[in-house]
Amino acid sequence: MIVGDVMLDEYIIGQHHRNSPEAVDVPVITAKNREARLGGAANVALNINTLGLKPILISVVGNDKHGLEVKSLLTEAEIHSHLITDNDRPTTVKQRIVDQSFRQYLRIDTESTEDLDSRILVQIENQIKETLLHSDIAALVIQDYNKGVITENLIKQIQQLSIKNNIPLFVDPKDKNFNLLSESCAVFKPNIKELSKEIGYEVSPDSASIREALAKLDTLGAEKIFITLGDKGIFYSDRSLTNHGIIKGIAVEKADVSGAGDTVLATLIWSFLQGANLPTMATQANHAAAQVCKVKGVSAMFNI
């Protein structure tokens, strides 16, 4: 069961023939095509689905055409979802203007980052409990993009449900609730930029520096920790910070990192449920990330 911020990744694909006569150095793109893909927590669900597991996605969309499109794409992918419609906020959309080689000229974000209204949160909480009651859930997942779905109270409730029902919790945090999200989970997966922001200085992508930074967290309670390092690979460690290492990144020419973190999280979940050890989990996730970075735009690895 995945709880988090869903979004629509939209690509306006065109050709750049000239610059605008109305402004300096502004390209004119002649639109040729449009693609819409699942993003955020919905992309995590898509990756989990293509790995052969059965995701149940719980989130919020706006009462708009983009919300309908997210629902349609989930139905098309045969992903079971409970998307609550909030009339007071838009569906999160990342609209990118690109050429046919996916060179990006502009990105326009439509979103609300305010915490959800209490009445919507109650509906989410009820849906989580209902799903746990009627489904055999092997893993709980929090995918936070700081778009308002993952609130402090909701985090605490999911953590309690994880402990009560003995279901491992997997967390991909953003900065807003970083410390709280690091508590009481089986797997904690920030990237090095998020860790650096939490600590207050730029953490070097080496084992000693990362362990030093993790030791400064007030409430690090994760059983397994994975820090994605971009093209440098993935750091892994246990809670005691003794069993640790770095799986080196795989070189990808002209890599597109869009959604790669979602693929890493999905692969770690799959690998964990297969009983893999720390280095094996990191190795499999590293390989999956490299594969998805070869594809232009947000994609699920096993849809390649």
Image: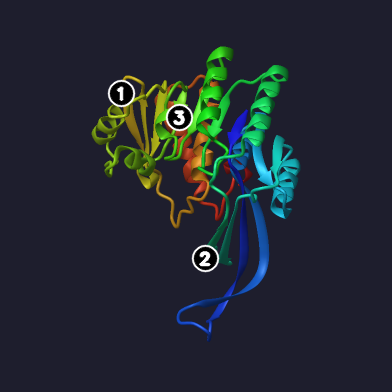
The image shows residue 206 at horizontal and vertical percentages of 27, 38
Amino acid type, mark 1: Leu
Amino acid type, mark 3: Leu
Vertical order, 246 against 27 (above or below): above
- For disc 1, the marked residue is 241
**Left or right: 182 with respect to 105?**
left
Quadrant including the N terminus? top right
Residue 55 seen from this side: no
Q: Residue at x 37, y 25 (%)?
A: 220
Q: Who comes first in sequence, dot 2 or dot 3?
A: 2
- For disc 3, the marked residue is 181
- For disc 2, the marked residue is 106
The image shows residue 91 at horizontal and vertical percentages of 64, 49
The image shows residue 150 at horizontal and vertical percentages of 54, 35
Q: Nearer the viewer, residue 172 or 32?
A: 172
**Left or right: 147 with respect to 226?**
right
Amino acid type, mark 2: Leu
Circle 1 or circle 2, nearest the eye: 2
Q: CA distance from mark 3 to mark 1?
A: 18 Å
Q: Residue at x 37, y 29 (%)?
A: 236
- The answer to whether the residue labelled 3 contacts the one labelled 1, judged by CB atoms less than 8 Å apart, is no
Q: Residue at x 62, y 57 (%)?
A: 10
